[in-house]
Image (cartoon, rainbow, N blue to C red):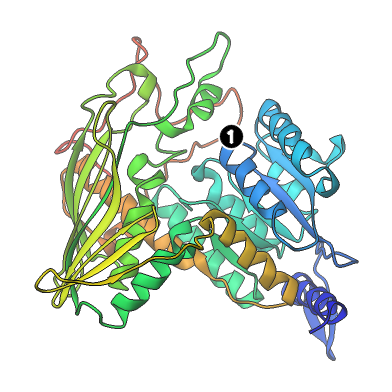
Amino acid sequence: MNHEELRDGRREFLKTSALVAGGVMINGVAFAAGGAHSSVDDTIKIALVGCGGRGTGAAFQALSTKQNLKLVAMADAFSDRLESAYKELSEKFKDKMDVPQERRFVGFDAYKKAIALADVVLLATPPGFRPSHFEEAISQNKHVFMEKPVAVDSPGIRKVLESHKIAQQKKLNVVVGLQRRYQNNYRDVVKRIQDGAIGNITGGQVYWNSGGVWVHPREAGQTEMEYQMRNWYYFNWLCGDHIVEQHVHNIDIANWVKNAYPVSIQGTGSRAWRTGKDYGEIYDNHSIEMTYEDGAVIHSQCRHFEGIDNRVDESFQGTGGRVFLSAGNEGRLYDSKGKLIYNYSSKVNPNPYQTEHDELFAAIAKGEYKFWDAERGAKSCLTAIMGRYATYSGKTIKWQDALNANNSLFPDQLAWDAKPKILPDADGLYPVPTPGKTKVI
């Protein structure tokens, strides 16, 4: 296929996605719904929604692909974050930046304006906003890259699953930032497992144990809404707790290896190290057991303690052997007697963060529909959310009960002077979940 054919295919694909799916067909002619958008040349226009570190990284990776791309719009709740991202990206991708001041949108509704101007949207705000932003992108007929996790509560998961169905109908590509799904050692070894290399998976252990993340001290004059958004990692309506925001990577591997989702989860957790008012409401450790329909039990552990031994990897046991995997490009299979039967080794190990974007934009440029990550991303996020429900409540949480729960964490109103649902007491401390007392669903 030559360049002209590729370009024409991409044009037709964008027209089909943005016009036919968003409007109607009359006698074989597409008529667009209001607000539908497609490029008039072979440039793929992208919009960045969420201009923090991960959003800037996602834009960097998108603009590093081989396709003809331009960043044409940016949106964030905070102008300082937007301008910082714009400066950093402009220094590296001057020729691919076309974001004048009038296309840099700030505020809670900025995402709608940015989405309207693009063919592809990068969604990288704190995850509490993801369900509504994803819904808007799909309603405007856009292809999507969205960071994990895709939601922080059960209503958010249901909204993402509903938008996923619409994206499928419209043939819109959606990639979710669970990048191990795009990492060569994981792809290679998981395929071998699913082809029966170590028999049926009966158990496993997945870990993300590390020293934790940043804190932004409260500043004079900040409203409670701004403080929580600046410190989004420590509030569940924005983050979901680190079992959801971070450990979802390892939990997703467990679901991938099992090719299933757990029917129930039980576990325990607490605040053992991060106990001060700077750490919001979330726990600093979780330990859960995920039970699958066939009786397999996979143990999941995550913690944020300073000075600990770090561990981020996955192990699984099967009826015919065992496996070890890690993000450091490791992948080893052993038989039932402990003999090494396969050791992944490759000198070519592309950055999986980059691979996500390379494959997404290559498909769009070729006019292909091949990515539907939203469903599996939502279900692995629900698995992690179930883990939080279990540790906070001390109860065994069933899959269907978690999926159907009406327990939205989102504020009733989004405004800088509006109040989130969780507020500090007179000493500046936030209420912390107590197993046996806290109700989660």
| Residue at image location 85% in from the left, 35% down from the top | 101
Q: Residues within 10 Å of mark 1 (few under 14, many from 20)?
A: some
Residue at the left extreme of this rendering: 337
Across and down, in percent, residue 213 comes to 41, 30
Q: In which image quadrant can residue 116 be found?
A: bottom right
Front in this rendered view, residue 56 or 193: 193
Across and down, in percent, residue 45 comes to 79, 57
| Residue at image location 32% in from the left, 63% down from the top | 331
Across and down, in percent, residue 286 comes to 23, 41
Q: Is residue 324 left or right of residue 146?
A: left
Task: Reply above or below: 106 against 388.
Answer: above
Residue at the front extreme of this rendering: 347
Q: In this figure, which residue is indicated by the disc labeled 1?
A: 414
| Residue at image location 83% in from the left, 90% down from the top | 28
Across and down, in percent, residue 292 comes to 20, 68
Quadrant into which the N terminus falls: bottom right
Front in this rendered view, residue 35 or 296: 296
Quick check: can you spot residue 441? Answer: no
Dot 1: element = loop
Front in this rendered view, residue 263 or 413: 263
Q: Please name the amino acid that badge 1 sits on.
A: Leu
